[in-house]
C-alpha cells in the first residue's frame, strides 16, 4: 500500500475514535512522509502537536497501521512545516531553555592568537554610546602604540570583548600577520601564571606574553587581588610598554573602581587612554538587530524588531539571545514570529533573572560592595558611608525586583516617600555619571552571580 493511502485509512479510523474537535486539532494536518526499515515517519505541524500525539495516540495509531500492514514495526513522529500550522503566540519555556545550550557557534577561535574571527569592526555598530572607544580602537590599528595602554570599560554584554578582539583581527589582516596580536581573558592569564609557578615554567609563560606585539587582555578586574598574578602581569606590562608594544585592556569598571588593583598598576592604566562603552540607544539597538539578521541571512517583521529594541535596552548579549530563540522558533518550530511571540519570549528569557533574586541577596550584595553591614543599611544612621548605599539598595529593590515603594519603605524601616526619593536620586545619578553607572552595574552583576 502506498504511504498516502495507508495514512488516509489510518486517519479514517482515528476520526471515528476521536471527537471531531480533537481530530481536527491534532491529526488533520498530519502526513505520512517516509518509510524506512519498518519504521513509519509521521509529520506533524508543531512540536506541541508532536508531543501531544506521541503521548495520547501513539498506541492507537501503531495498532491501526499494523493491522493494515504487518511489516510496520514502529511509528515515529516528526515536526514538519509543510502542513498548515495553527498559529500560536506563546512558546514552551522548556523548549526555549534548550536553545541556550545549543549555542550557535559559527566560527572557531584561532589557536595562535586566540582571536575569534567573528568579531570585526565591520560587524560592530557604532553610535554615541561607544564612538569614542571605537575611534580609539580604530586609531590603534593605524598607529600601533598610539594609545598605550588602551583601557575600555563598560557593563556586561555591551561589546567590550567584540571591540578589543576586532582590533586584533583588523591588525592581522592589515599587516598580513607580520604584527602578532594575542588575546587572553584575564582568568586564563592567571591560570597560566599559577601553572608556571607551580611547575617551574614561569619563564615559558613570560616569554609567550612578552613575545607578542599587541597584548589584548579581557576582563582585567579578575586579576585584581591575586598577588602573584598581578606581579607577573605588571612585569609583562612594563616589558611590553617599554618596547612600545600595544596593550589593550577591558574591564567591567574604570581603573579607579577596581578596589583590589595595586596602585602602581592602576596609575599605569589611568595614564593610558581610557574610554567607556555605555548603553546603546534605540537606533543602535535596531541597527544591531538588523546586522545580526543579515549576518544570519534571516528576517523578522519590523514590529518584532521594534519590540526587541524597545524592550531589551541594557545588554546586547541578552538581546542577541532572544533573537536567536526567535530565529530558532521560526526555523525549527515553524512559528510565525509576531510581536506577541516576541513579547512572550522576552518575558520568559529575562524575567527569570529577576524572579531568581530575593531581597536579602540585594541587600547583601550592596552591603558587601560598600563594606558596610545589612544592619547599617536598615538603620537610621546618617553617616555618609551608609546613606548612599542605602539609597542604592532601595533603587535596586525597585529596579530588579519591581517591588512597590511602600513595601521597600517598610523593608528599610522608612516611609514610601523616602523610597521614591531614593529611587529617583539614584536613577538621575546613573544617567549623568558613567562611573557611578558602572558601580551600579557591578553590584547588579554581583547580585545575579550570587
Ligand atoms: P562584553 O564583553 O562587554 O560583555 P561582548 O563583546 O561579548 O560584551 O558583546 C556581547 C554580544 O553583543 C556579542 O555577540 C557582540 O557581538 C554583540 N555586540 C555588542 N556590541 C555590539 C555592537 N556595537 N555592534 C554589534 N554587535 C555588538
Ligand atoms: Mg566580554
Image (cartoon, rainbow, N blue to C red):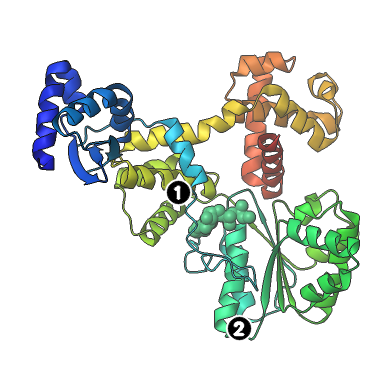
Residue at image mark 2: 177
**Quarter of the picture holding the C terminus:** top right
Going by the image, does 269 lie left or right of 278?
Answer: right
Residue at image location 72% in from the left, 15% down from the top: 414
Looking at the image, which is closer to me, 155 or 431? 155
Residue at image mark 1: 282
Residue 373 drawn at (x, y percent) = 85, 26
Position of 139 relative to 187 (above/below): below
Which of the 4 image quadrants contains residue 307?
A: top left
Residue 275 drawn at (x, y percent) = 67, 61
- Count neighbours of disc 1 (C-alpha within 10 A) and say few if under 14, some if 14 to 19, many if 20 or more: some
Residues under labels 2 and 1: Cα distance?
37 Å
Looking at the image, which is closer to me, 322 or 374? 322
Going by the image, does 285 lie left or right of 339?
Answer: right
Chain-order first, disc 2 or disc 1: 2
Looking at the image, which is closer to me, 207 or 269? 207
Q: Nearer the observer, disc 2 or disc 1?
A: 2
Does the closest atom of ligand 1 sit within 8 Å of the Cβ of label 1?
no
Position of 386 relative to 116 (above/below): above
Q: Is residue 89 visible?
A: no
Looking at the image, which is closer to me, 312 or 15? 15
Say whether marks 2 and 1 touch (CB < 8 Å): no
Amino acid at each position: 500500500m502506498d504511504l498516502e493511502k495507508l495514512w488516509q485509512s489510518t486517519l479514517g479510523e482515528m476520526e471515528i475514535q476521536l471527537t471531531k474537535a480533537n481530530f481536527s486539532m491534532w491529526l488533520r494536518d498530519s502526513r505520512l512522509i517516509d518509510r524506512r526499515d519498518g519504521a513509519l515517519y509521521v509529520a506533524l505541524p508543531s512540536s506541541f502537536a508532536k508531543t501531544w500525539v506521541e503521548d495520547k495516540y501513539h498506541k492507537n495509531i501503531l495498532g491501526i497501521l499494523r493491522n493494515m500492514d504487518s511489516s510496520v514495526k514502529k511509528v515515529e513522529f516528526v515536526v514538519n512545516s509543510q502542513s498548515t500550522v495553527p498559529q500560536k503566540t506563546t512558546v514552551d519555556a522548556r523548549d526555549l531553555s534548550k536553545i541556550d545550550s545549543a549555542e550557535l557557534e559559527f566560527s572557531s577561535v584561532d589557536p595562535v592568537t586566540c582571536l575569534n574571527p567573528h568579531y570585526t569592526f565591520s560587524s560592530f555598530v557604532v553610535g554615541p554610546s561607544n564612538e569614542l572607544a571605537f575611534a580609539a580602537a580604530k586609531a590603534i590599528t593605524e598607529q600601533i602604540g598610539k594609545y598605550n595602554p588602551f583601557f575600555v570599560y563598560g557593563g556586561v554584554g555591551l561589546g567590550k570583548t567584540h571591540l578589543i578582539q576586532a582590533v586584533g583581527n583588523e591588525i592581522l589582516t592589515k599587516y598580513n600577520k607580520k604584527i602578532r596580536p594575542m588575546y587572553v581573558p584575564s582568568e586564563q592569564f592567571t591560570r597560566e601564571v599559577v601553572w608556571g609557578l607551580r611547575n617551574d615554567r614561569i619563564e615559558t609563560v613570560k616569554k609567550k606574553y612578552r613575545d607578542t606585539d599587541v597584548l589584548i587582555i579581557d576582563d582585567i578586574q579578575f586579576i585584581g587581588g591575586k598577588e602573584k598574578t598581578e606581579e607577573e602581569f605588571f612585569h609583562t606590562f612594563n616589558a611590553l610598554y617599554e618596547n612600545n608594544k600595544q596593550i589593550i585592556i577591558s574591564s567591567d569598571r574604570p581603573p579607579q573602581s577596581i578596589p583590589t588593583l595595586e596602585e602602581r598598576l592602576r596609575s599605569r592604566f589611568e595614564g593610558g587612554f581610557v574610554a567607556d562603552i555605555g548603553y546603546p540607544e534605540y537606533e543602535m539597538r535596531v541597527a544591531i538587530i538588523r546586522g545580526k539578521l543579515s549576518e544570519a541571512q534571516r528576517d523578522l517583521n519590523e514590529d518584532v524588531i521594534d519590540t526587541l529594541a524597545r524592550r531589551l535596552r541594557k545588554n546586547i548579549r541578552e538581546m542577541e539571545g532572544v533573537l536567536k530563540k526567535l530565529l530558532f522558533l521560526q526555523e525549527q518550530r515553524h512559528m510565525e514570529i509576531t510581536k506577541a511571540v516576541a513579547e512572550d519570549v522576552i518575558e520568559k528569557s529575562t524575567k527569570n533573572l529577576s524572579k531568581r533574586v530575593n531581597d536579602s541577596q540585594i541587600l547583601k550584595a550592596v552591603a558587601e560592595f560598600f563594606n558596610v553591614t545589612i544592619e547599617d543599611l536598615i538603620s537610621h544612621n546618617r553617616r555618609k558611608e551608609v546613606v548612599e548605599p542605602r539609597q542604592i539598595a532601595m533603587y535596586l529593590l525597585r529596579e530588579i525586583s519591581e517591588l512597590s515603594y511602600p513595601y521597600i519603605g517598610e523593608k528599610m524601616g522608612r516611609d514610601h516617600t523616602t523610597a521614591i526619593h531614593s529611587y529617583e536620586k539614584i536613577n538621575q545619578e546613573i544617567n549623568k555619571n558613567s562611573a557611578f553607572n558602572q558601580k551600579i552595574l557591578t553590584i547588579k552583576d554581583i547580585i545575579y552571580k550570587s
